[in-house]
Image: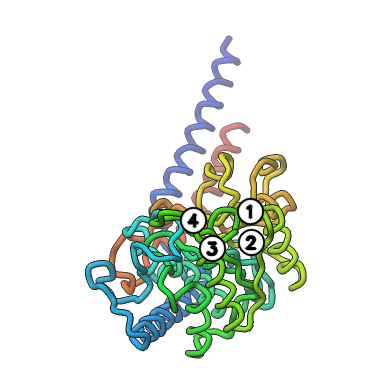
Amino acid sequence: MMKERQTMWRVGLVVSILAASLVLAEVFSKQVEHPAFSRMQGAADRMTRAEAAIAARRVALGIAIDPNLDPYRTGLIGAESSFLTTTVGDIVAKRTTTTTAFAALVVRYFYELGLRPGDRIAVGSSGSFPGILLAVLSACAETGVEPVIITSIGASEYGANIEGLSNAEMVAACRDAGIWPFMPAAISPGSDADQGISSLYRLEPSDELARYAHDIAARLQVPFIKGNNLEESIALHLRTYQQAGPIKAFVNIGGADVNFGGDTDSLKLKPGLILPSVGRQSKLGGLVGYYLSRGIPVIHLLNIKGLALQSGIPIDSNPFAPLPADVTYSRKKLEWLLILGLVLASAALA
């Protein structure tokens, strides 16, 4: 009986020592600058220049910036309705996407994935969040990661839904301004099943969106892709990515059917970095499901408010504010406390 009590006492002491060392290591942990801090800052600065280029292009086109919708005059907030509008949108989420901290966040994701200069990623973007597309391309330009971009033209309310300022035209404007060398590898219509049928704010459906997407592709000398149905469109997008070479990650921006799937399982995905997990993504649709099922990680940039909250990025605030510490710093625990705890625990057992 005495021996059993001694054993129980030792086990309790060991557990107490280990728990205390873990708590102390957490309490006395400190914030340290992330290894990719300089590239994060560079990407944010580049995104600032990109937004200035878009605002200048907007002024040149004679399209006024509404200070009530876009108080910081980023030029990225579209109209509530237009023939490019496919779904409803949240103005607060749209303004949040103009925050340059998202460019820094994407750099952090690249670092976590171990991406190196010259690595190729597939980028599938709807027109709903042009700020996020600018953030991703700013991160690519700063890190040397090569994006293979397919952007659709359809956009939700307040997105890239103004004629002359679609997603593809914004990318081209920034290329012309020398902010990055990138252009879309292809342009697709967007909307339901990537067919480019505009029905929001219309008495009857129209293919005006599809025709506009085709015209933009011709003007920018970029391939136009459109299947007869969703499955064909997915196959055409995938072929474009495969022709570019090996893909190290897939980036989804927005909720385009081709990229996101939009099925029940896809809607459950949390935004941010998603690593492949055996059997977990077998039912996911779109290119997100395709790449995850083949062991390729995904950066899922949707549910902007949730993404901002989990990343420490302020919602609907000054987009040019200093980068938040939650993005640019990491917590470093005092490892010697953990080691000391293990030593004491071992001594107690002995």
Cα–Cα span, label 3 and label 2: 29 Å
Q: What secondary structure is found at the residue carrying circle 3? A: loop
Question: Mark 4 or mark 1, which is nearer the start of the sequence?
Answer: 4
Query: Mark 2, residues whose alpha carbon is within 10 Å: few (<14), some, or many (≥20)?
Result: many
Q: Position of residue 146 (x, y in %)?
A: 64, 76
**Residue ID for mark 1:** 288
Labels in figure, total: 4
Give the residue drawn at x 46%, y 63%: 155
**Residue ID for mark 4:** 205
Cα–Cα span, label 1 and label 4: 28 Å
Question: Mark 2 or mark 1, which is nearer the start of the sequence?
Answer: 2
Q: Position of residue 6 (x, y in %)?
A: 56, 20
Instruction: Check contact, mark 2 vs mark 4: CB within 8 A.
Output: no
Position of the C terminus by quadrant: top right
**Residue ID for mark 3:** 207
Q: Quadrant of residue 344?
A: top right
Cα–Cα span, label 1 and label 3: 27 Å
Among all residues in the image, which is located at the extreme left?
A: 68
Instruction: Check contact, mark 1 vs mark 3: CB within 8 A.
Output: no
Instruction: Check contact, mark 3 vs mark 4: CB within 8 A.
Output: yes
Which amino acid, mark 2?
Answer: Phe
Query: Mark 1, residues whose alpha carbon is within 10 Å: few (<14), some, or many (≥20)?
Result: many
Question: Mark 2 or mark 3, which is nearer the start of the sequence?
Answer: 3
Instruction: Check contact, mark 1 vs mark 4: CB within 8 A.
Output: no
Cα–Cα span, label 3 and label 4: 7 Å
Q: What secondary structure is found at the residue carrying circle 2? A: strand
Is residue 212 visible to the viewer in this orientation of the structure? yes
Q: Front-most of 147 and 5?
A: 147
Name the mark on residue 250.
2
